[in-house]
Image (cartoon, grey):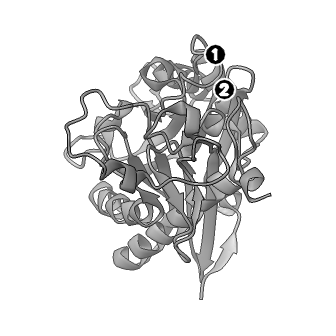
Amino acid sequence: MEHEISIREIKGLHIGQTEDAAAGTGCTVLICERGMSAGLDIRGGGPASRDTHLLDPLTAAQTIHAVVLGGGSAFGLGAADGVMAYLEERNIGFDVGVTKVPLVAQSDIFDLTVGDKSVRPDRAMGYAAAKNAMEAPNYRDGNYGAGCGATVGKLAGMETCMKSGIGSYAVQLGPLQIGAIVVVNALGDVYDWKTGRKVAGLLKPDKRGFRDSVALMEESIAIHENRFAENTTIGAIVTNAAFTKAQLCKIAGMAHNGYARSIRPVHTSADGDSIYALSVGEISADIDLVGTLAAQVMSEAILRAVTSAESAYGFLAAKELRG
C-alpha cells in the first residue's frame, strides 16, 4: 500500500511561493532545472494561461522547465517573465546557441474581487517565487502563493462564498512517488471525496451553514448570460515516473476525476479548470495505476486546500465554520 509523503520529498522538483497578503494574490512556481516532460488537460470554459500549447504532444519541445500557478487572472501572466529571467541567470533552459531559453507554462485563477484588484502577480513576484524555489523552498498549504486570494462557493456572488487556498498531497508506493498541488478557486462546493460531507462552499445568507449550489442551479432553467465567471481550479500532478507528453496528457485527464469527486458543480463554462501532469524522474510505472493515484492525490489536495485555509478578507474558512 502507498503511504503519505510530503510533496517536497519528490526528487527533482523545486517549489517556491510568494504572495502579497494585503492585496490577496500571489504565485507558486514548480521548477525542474534539468527539464520535465509535461502534459495538460483543460476542462473549464474560461482558462487564463500562457504557453500551454508547449504541452501539446504535436509541438516540438519535449520538456519544459517550470510551471507557474498564479493569481490575477490574465493580468497575472507576466509572472512567468520573472521566472524566465531567474532561470536564464542560472543558465537553465533550452539551448539556442546564444543563450538558454527557459520554457515556462502558466495558469492563473481569478482573484481580482479579493483584496486589491490593482495588484497582480508580476515579473518581480515571479522572480521572487522562482528564487525561493531554488534557494529557499518555502511551499506551504493554505493562504500562500497562488492560494492567497482563492475562494469557493460563488454561485450567488462573493457575499456568501468562503475562503479557500492552495493544498498538496503526495504518496509513495515502492519507488514510485506521486503528488498533487492545487489552487481551489471553484464556482462550486467542495466535498470530502471519501465521506461525501460538504467541507466548504456556498453559505446561507446568515453564514451559519451551507446552501447547495447544484440545488440552487436547479431552481431555474433560464439561461444565465455572463454568469459570475470569476473562478478556476488549477493544479499539477507531479511524479518521478517517466512518461511522454501524450501519456502525461492522459494522466492529467484522469486526475480530473479528482476534481469531479470533490467539487460540484465542476468544469463549468464559468470555471477555467486545468491540470498539469509533470514527470521529473525515470521510474518505470503503469500509466493506469499512476492516473488512478493522480485522481486520489488530487482529491486529497483539494481537501487540504480548503481545510488549511484561514479566514481572510471577510471570507469565512472551513476550520472556522466547523468551530
Q: Hey, which quadrant is residue 130 in on the image? A: top right
Choose between 116 and 127: the one closer to the eye.
116
Residue 311 percent across, percent down from the top left: 74, 40
| Camera-nearest residue between 232 and 145 | 232
Image quadrant where residue 229 sits: top left
- SS of the residue at dot 2? loop
Left or right relative to 268: residue 150: right
- What residue lies at 46% left-to-right and 23% top-to-bottom? 77
Q: Tag 1, which secondary structure? A: loop
Give left or right: position of 220 versus 323: left
Mark 1–mark 2 distance (CA, rounded to whole Å) = 7 Å
- Answer with mark 1 or mark 2, whichever residue precedes in sequence: 2
Quadrant showing the N terminus: bottom right
Please say if the residues under marks 1 and 2 sit with CB atoms less than 8 Å apart.
yes
Instruction: Give the quarter of the image for residue 300.
Output: bottom right
Which amino acid is tagged 2? Gly
Q: Would you name the residue on which mark 1 appears?
A: 116
Residue 253 image point, x, y percent: 32, 60
Q: Is 164 above or below relative to 82?
A: below
Amino acid found under the numbered disc labelled 1: Asp
**As displayed, is residue 125 above or below residue 216?**
above
Residue 2 spot, x, y in % from top left: 60, 82
Residue 316 disc label = none
Q: Which residue is mark 2?
A: 24
Q: How many marks can you see?
A: 2
Residue at x 75% of width, y 55% of height: 319
Which image quarter is the C terminus in? bottom right
Residue 53 location (% of width, % of height): 28, 36
